[in-house]
Amino acid sequence: MNLSDLTATLEYWQTAGILSLSSDRLQFPPESRPSPIPGISSGNNDSPATQRQQPTHTPKPSPPPPPAPPPQPVTLTTAPLPPDLRREKLDTLARSLTDCTRCELARMRKHMVFGVGNIGAEVVFVGEGPGAEEDLRAEPFVGDAGKLLNKMIHAIPLQRHEVYIANVVKCRPPDNRNPLPPEIDQCQPFLFEQLETIRPKVIFALGRFAILCLTHHSGPIEKIRGKTPLWRGIPVIPSYHPAFYLRSPSRKKAAWEDLIRLKKILLF
Ligand code: URA
């Protein structure tokens, strides 16, 4: 057991109230208090007898644990805005990002692709990042995946202009590669600002990067599909990316199942 395991164990014992148990159990004077678990104080697997013969051994410090992700707000962090101020806020945000150079994607993009649709929408579809066609036209989901997304929207049944569509990253990752963690870190606050401003009734997360950003789920999509995690209190429907269905048309049933769940929330 390493030092951080030991610390965690001791913290657990403290929170479990073990140090306040009566003296015939575990309450020892601090200087003679034994290690609560034999064998852990020296950082090795020696028996307690062996440990007592090596009192001068200094445990090697273990590397620090990875930093915990910052705590996420559980509810929306801003007050709702009236529609004209929503428009103004989103326009200002979009203008501020037009020449953004926060990450490497800026060097290769033709256009920053902010988002499109109804700023009072009840549903926001969130994708991964613009592709070649979107980069040229400065609009999300206008290529082949976009055509399929339009069909999905019509199935609810809604029109594209009635919903809002945005991406996790606003500039095209070259050669259709995945967005990298620093690119996502830089860009996701702007998606969150869009969502806070629009504050839809439900968010439809298309593919693993949208799911990761909105729910912190990083495992296989099938492990979270069918659940309804919340993003700042707003239900999120985790689903596959339309590009997945273009590659695997036989899996399209999943899209309709998720759209039915979306529809139920919209009708509720
Ligand atoms: N794929 C996405 O995730 N977003 C787009 O805008 C287009 C394709």
Image (cartoon, rainbow, N blue to C red):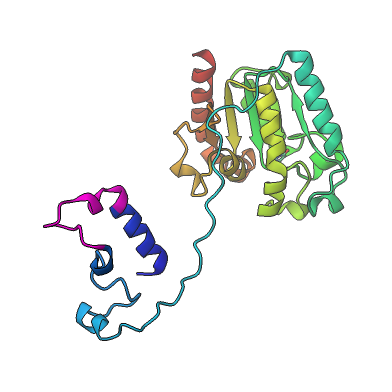
Residue in the foreground of this view, choosing between 126 and 161: 126
Identify which residue is drawn at 80% across, 37% down: 113
**Quarter of the picture holding the N terminus:** bottom left
Horizontally, is 242 left or right of 4 in the view?
right
Q: Residue at x 59, y 28 (%)?
A: 203
Number of marks drawn: 0
Residue 251: percent from the left, percent from the top? 52, 39
Q: Residue furthest bottom?
A: 53
Instruction: Give, as a single range, the part of the protein colored magenta.
Output: 14-29
Q: Name the magenta segment's main secondary structure.
A: loop
Whether residue 151 is visible, yes or no, is no
Q: Quadrant of ligand 1?
A: top right
Residue 89 in view (yes/no): yes
Is 203 situated left or right of 130 in this image? Answer: left
x and y percent of residue 30 in the render? 27, 63
Left of 194 or right of it: where is 132? right
- Tell me: residue 102, above or below residue 231: below
Identified at 30% across, 71% down, the residue is: 40
| Horizontal and vertical percent position of residue 253 | 50, 33
Taking depth in this image into account, of 262 and 192 the one nearest to the observer is: 192
- Whether residue 53 is situated above or below residue 88 in the rendered picture: below
Which residue is painted at 32% across and 53% down in the image?
12
Whether residue 25 is in magenta: the answer is yes
Would you place residue 21 above or below residue 77 in this image? below
Is 210 rendered above or below residue 19? above
175 or 205, which lies in front?
205
